[in-house]
Amino acid sequence: MAKSNKTQKQKLMNLLASGQNVPATTLAKKLGVRSVSAHIANLRNEGLVIWTNTGSNGTSYRFDAVRS
């Protein structure tokens, strides 16, 4: 089986593409990173709209297909 050559950015975009809230812990585990918020900030700097929801269950992120 060939190893996936997707970048962390592509993996993050794929996980957020559902439009559903994705917990930060899930993103960290799937991407193998410690600072999910830094990756989210980079995507926001590129003009993507990513919502942050903070609640009793922790932080989650949601991608909006609209560009600012």
Image: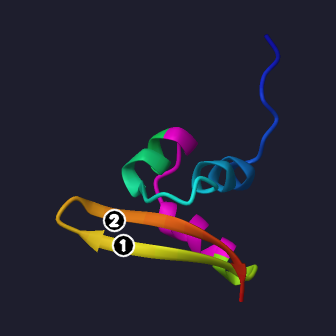
Q: Secondary structure at mark 1?
A: strand
Q: Is residue 61 magenta?
A: no
Indicate the position of residue 24 as horizontal and vertical percent values: 41, 56
Residue 58 appears left or right of 34: left
- What stretch of residues is rendered in magenta? 30-43
Q: Secondary structure at mark 2?
A: strand
Indicate the position of residue 5 as horizontal and vertical percent values: 82, 35
CA gap, disc 2 to disc 1? 6 Å
Tell me, for residue 53, which label it has, or none.
Answer: 1
The residue to which callout 2 is attached is: 59
**Residue at the farthest left position:** 56
- The total of numbered circles placed on residues is 2
Q: Is residue 41 magenta?
A: yes
Q: Quadrant of residue 23?
A: bottom left
Q: Inspect the image, locate mark 2, and give the three-letter code of the amino acid beneath it.
A: Thr
For image coordinates 42% across by 46% down, the residue present is: 26
